[in-house]
Amino acid sequence: MTVRLIECRRGDRVRIVRIEAGRGAILNLINLGLNVSHTIELLQRSPLRGPLLVAHRGTAVAIGYQLAERILVEKD
Amino acid sequence: MQLVLVGQPYSGKSTIFNAVVGYKSLSTNAPGSSVEHAHGSAELDGERMDVIDLPGIYSLQASDDADDPAVEHVLQAPADTVLVNVIDASVLARSLELTLQLTELRRPMVVALNMGDEVRRKRVTIDADKLAIALGVPVVETTGRSGEGILDLFRAAARAGREHLVPAVLPGPPHVERLLAQFTDLLGDRPLPDGLAPRFIAIKLLERDACVQRRLRPHLDPSDQAAIEEQLADFEATTEQPADFVMSAVRHHLAFALFESVAQMGPPPGRDLGRRLDHFLTHPVSGYAVLGVVLTAMFSFVFKVGSAIEPVFLDAFERLEPRLAEVFPAGSLELSLAHGLVAGFGGGIGIVVPYLLPFFLALALLEDTGYLPRVAFLTDNLMHRIGLHGLSVVPILMGYGCSVPGVLATRILKNRRDRLITATLTTLIPCSARMTIIFGLIGFFISMQAAVFVYAANLGLAALVGWILSRLMPEESPGLIMELPRYHRPRVKPLLQKTWFRLKEFVVIAWPILIAGSVVLEVFDHYQWSGPLNQSLAPYTSTLLGFPPVVGVTLLFGILRKELALVLLFAAIGTSDVPSVMTTSQIFGYTFFVTFYVPCLATFAALAKELGTKAALSVTFGTLTVVTVLTVLLRFAMQFSLG
């Protein structure tokens, strides 16, 4: 089932299927090891459209809400 | 020989740099800490080497059209440069992606497999020799924090430079290699910018890298450009993806394959303390609770220390005053000059030691433990309301100590818009000098509650200005993408060194201005120029703002140093009993005005340094206009309500 990253719950392990963002944002994500087909774990969500915290291979990355809205993931 | 330390953020470059050349670089556990590259030199086995520490970069691939200064530095490095690629071995797969890009530069290189302690904790074993064979350059295991392996690293770097040990190139899949070969053929034996390797340029052409394209333009004719575009279009038609994403994916796979061939994973460690800590510290409830406690503790620590130490220094300088009168004849210009020097010098110490020192110490502690990026995470939603993102919280926090380092800290922000807005807000944050005025005037003469109210209003004003500015300059940045580094146990020496490093910025930029300001003031006083000046300012200060005309001179000198306005006010009205001369609404208005009207001269200098003179002038006059209007409104509102 494909959903947006913001719709996931804490502790979910999901696979990135599409990133609907600009080139700069995509490259920034890729640089931190977050790319299409990678599996990430949602570690934390924050209130009031705050950022999300995800982990991928030992790296924890904070992603702003607006960007997380544009990351499509598939739940395992 | 020149050694350039290059690596991803948090890889520990600065720690290695500092271990070798002494403390010149801010090695921290917060993003973008080495904001400008640091130079140093070291002597190794009788040979002198220049060492440069660059800010961390994740990739040589530009994510926007702006040049990244660190990437530029790598590309333009002189021919005798040895690249020292520092890798956080505990995130080896990801780190190798940058390493692979560096190998394409075909320059002498060594690799430091750093963070050995963390690798052992994760129960990973890395075969450094195997990696060295694959990359074709020396690989040295280091633990920057303990200094282990650093000497070997620099010896290996010196050898790589002498023997010109250039890394091997790992080829990508055939379709990519074919395109790269087409591009290198096209480049032929044309002279290339900065002596860059043809294959590297070919990769950059494939990635449509704007910065390299710009440099290449003089070397290519329009038909070449058209041919390149055509070949790229063909390539993308088969891959069905933008070519730069293809290249990233290729690199990712190469790096991962290399990682798998050299690393062996042991059984996973039972529990990850850092992960658990993060769960608690970024949690929507406990995270904010801890943040509140930490900030309260930090500020009360600073004010406790400050108010305890300040009198000691003030007394010392007051005792110096009569001595001056003994040395210089009364009423002489020399006495005035000496007075000015002592007052400026003492004023600087009075800010630095009691307030800035404890403040920067506390801030350094938050940084080194790795808590500061968590603060940025927690405040991102709030900062979003005023059009910024979480990272802006770092300069703003610093602004509580002094606006000068706060403004300088905006360098950690990537785009200019964010820097401009954050710097403007930082100049509005109640710094230690403004606190002195607010609590010294309103707190002392009206009430403590009123002072707290003004303090809170100050924050409200900053938020309002941020909200307005972010609407004037709509967001272009993609929002927050920030790595949260691992937690570290802070160590005393780096903590002290970093605090000193930050204080130095204040000492170098702000202190000379304080001293010069005090001297000018004394000269002014000596020749009794205040009267005519007050008169010429009266239409503004008195008619418009409603202050007694005698305060004109205090406003002028408050620009040099905010607390001067307070000290001078007592002198100007001839008494320290302010309410006998000024009404409550005048004291309110005056405090409000002095707190905000313009950034002090030292802050102006910092703004001009970071953002350019034009931006610094816009911030200054913008603030002056807004604050004049607000003061006039406040004046009539107070008159109306107080009758």
Image (cartoon, rainbow, N blue to C red):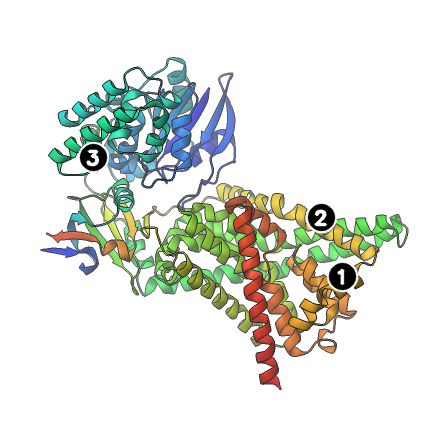
Of B473 and A5, the residue lying toward us: B473
For this orientation, the residue located farthest to the right is B329
Asked whether, in this view, residue B327 is left or right of residue A62, the answer is: right
Disc 3 marks a residue whose amino acid type is Ala
Chain ID, mark 1? B
Residue marked by disc 3: B243
Asked whether, in this view, residue B558 is left or right of residue B80, the answer is: right
Label 2 secondary element: helix
Disc 1 marks a residue whose amino acid type is Leu
Earlier-in-chain disc, 3 versus 2: 3
Which numbered dot is residue B317?
none
Q: Looking at the picture, how far across and down is residue B422, in whole percent?
A: 46, 54
* Residue at x 67%, y 46% (from the top left corner): B512
Earlier-in-chain disc, 3 versus 1: 3
Tell me where residue B10 sits by quadrant. top left
Q: Looking at the picture, how far across and down is residue A7, in whole percent?
A: 18, 60
Residue marked by disc 2: B516
Q: Looking at the picture, how far across and down is residue B410, in whole percent?
A: 47, 49
| C-alpha gap between disc 1 and disc 2 | 19 Å
